[in-house]
Amino acid sequence: MIQSPSPDWIIKTFSPRSLRLCGKSYWEDQLLGFGPLGKILILLGVFIVLIGVLLLIGEKIPWVGRLPGDILVRKKNFTFYFPITTSIIISIILTLLFALFRK
């Protein structure tokens, strides 16, 4: 016949003293696990602020969106604009920035 574990075994196994990991309690270790998430949220916030600043300043830079190679088609009731050259230049700049800050 199989005996169930005694309540003393459960208390000893899950007591705060037995749940210590590397000098920290189990709960402290769980709370410290949010550090990477906080860093990601801060970087996301900085990225959003930078996009906002670029949108504010972008109107004052005359050549952005008007480079040779940007496609603009105007008809009577229709306008199509595809800034392909501007997109390529922005992509190259972002690739270089991400390569510099990768490590």
Image (spheres, rainbow, N blue to C red):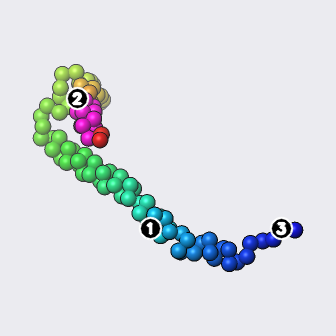
Residue 10 included in the magenta stretch of the image: no
Mark earlier in primary sequence (1, 3):
3
Q: Which label belongs to residue 51?
A: none
Asked if residue 9 can be seen in this view, the reply is yes
Q: Residues within 10 Å of mark 3 (few under 14, many from 20)?
A: few
Q: Nearer the viewer, mark 2 or mark 1?
A: 1
The image shows residue 81 at horizontal and vertical percentages of 27, 29
**Which residue is tagged 3?**
2
Q: Residues within 10 Å of mark 2 (few under 14, many from 20)?
A: few
The amino acid type, in three-letter code, at marker 2 is Ile
Q: Nearer the viewer, residue 97 or 73?
A: 97
**Which residue is tagged 2?**
89
**Which residue is tagged 1?**
23
Q: Residues within 10 Å of mark 1 (few under 14, many from 20)?
A: few
The amino acid type, in three-letter code, at marker 3 is Ile
Q: Nearer the viewer, residue 83 or 48?
A: 48
Residue 97 included in the magenta stretch of the image: yes
Q: Nearer the viewer, residue 88 or 30?
A: 30
- The residue drawn where x is 68% and y is 74% is 9
Mark earlier in primary sequence (2, 1):
1
Q: Nearer the viewer, residue 12 or 64?
A: 12
Q: Nearer the viewer, mark 2 or mark 3?
A: 3
The image shows residue 58 at horizontal and vertical percentages of 17, 41
- The residue drawn where x is 24% and y is 25% is 85
Tell me where the magenta segment starts and ends, as one range. Answer: 90-101
Q: Quadrant of residue 2?
A: bottom right
2 and 1 marks in contact (CB < 8 Å): no
- The residue drawn where x is 43% and y is 60% is 33
Mark earlier in primary sequence (2, 3):
3
- The residue drawn where x is 66% and y is 73% is 10
Distance between the Cα atoms at labels 2 and 3?
72 Å
Task: Say which element carries label 2.
Answer: helix
